[in-house]
Amino acid sequence: MTSQAAVSNVLMQARVLGAHLFCLYFPLTVMAYLLTGPRPWEQAAPWLLVVVLSVFWDKRSGAATRQPPAQLVAWPFDALLVVHVVLQVANLVLFCRYVEQVGFLAFDTMMAVVLVMVNSGISAIVVAHELVHRPRHRMQRLGRLLLSTVLYEHFFTEHIRGHHPRVGTDADPATARFGETYRQFFRRTVPGQFRSAWHLECKRLGDEGMPLWDRRQKDNRVLHGVVVECLLALGIGAVFGGGALCAFLMQAHGAVSLLEAVNYFEHYGLRRSGKKVATVDSWDAESRFTLYALVGLSRHADHHANATRPYQQLRHFEDSPKLPYGYFATAMLAVFKNQTFRRLMENELQRRKLGPFAEPVVPA
């Protein structure tokens, strides 16, 4: 490699990494809030603009359709994920201590719950999603740790061994049906994913129908997650008090609700036509804001077609259906204006002849 090519390669690497560093803006903002309080309500309320502006920028940030470079040094991007793990754990400790000092019913605390909830959806769940797909066990364990901070550790089992093989079929509880509302989907998918994860682990241990008291359950990873989550919650209650425990449970519920809003629109109305997952079986978002704020999650079509591809090298595909906005704005639309959301999604499915509008496959 010539010196000019080497310099060009370093600059390209720095450009891509610099863009992905944007994903730290929310966890660092939340940390700033928790470190500079307490504050009266009139000083706390403006911090909600962080969420409002995220939705605003997400709708107006422009399309990110450029393909990633073929070769990128992996370790800086892996290190960025580890930074998220550290920030998530630190923010939760600061959050619990904040609630203990300020009080559960204070307006300042409720604003902290909102900010930490959204941040947990990013630093905990989105980053965990990336980590659990990594082949190295220590990276997977970090992902499982993050999922435990929102009481959703079974997502590790269900997502990898349940959702990915079954996506776009009726067997997948995380694939939203055409016409299904977000509330209907949420009520179906949350218990459905836990049951699926439990059955997958029991099957791995030798008997899908084994009772809880079976000796083999000591190796059940889903059960391990439940135990860790219970110990975490009890520890927070013992150290920081009942108010902190309630606030912790609220942020976990909110983060999971955001996760399931994302699950809801990532495969809404799509039905897989073949055994292999194709790029038309997942919805993509072209928002530049979402791409870099959520470590590449918006390129979901490539992720499902190539599940081991790291976030910084996920590709843009023209043939995948496109969401009306980025993930932040689409999540708000799906939750609060669901009828409008379903109409827009139907228009895109109809335009691309996918889902219920797909042309019937003629046997050869």
Image (tube, grey):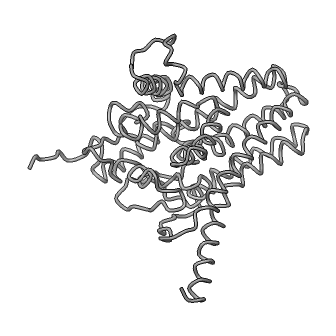
**Residue reaching furthest to the left:** 364
x and y, in percent, of residue 5 in the image: 56, 85
How many marks overall? 0
User: Which of the 4 image quarters holds residue 73?
Assistant: bottom right
User: Which of the 4 image quarters holds residue 342?
Assistant: top left
State the residue at coordinates (67%, 33%): 149
State the residue at coordinates (81%, 19%): 242
Q: Determine whether, in the image, residue 224 is placed left or right of residue 341.
A: right
Near-viewer residue (207 or 84): 207
Q: Determine whether, in the image, residue 115 is placed left or right of residue 109.
A: left
Near-viewer residue (140 or 346): 140
Near-viewer residue (351 or 165): 165
State the residue at coordinates (60%, 23%): 226
x and y, in percent, of residue 233 in the image: 72, 24
**Residue reaching furthest to the front:** 215
x and y, in percent, of residue 22 in the image: 67, 59
State the residue at coordinates (45%, 29%): 185
Near-viewer residue (181 or 263): 263
Q: Determine whether, in the image, residue 350 is placed left or right of residue 341.
A: left
Q: Determine whether, in the image, residue 257 is placed left or right of residue 29.
A: left
User: Which of the 4 image quarters holds residue 188?
Assistant: top left
x and y, in percent, of residue 66 in the image: 49, 69
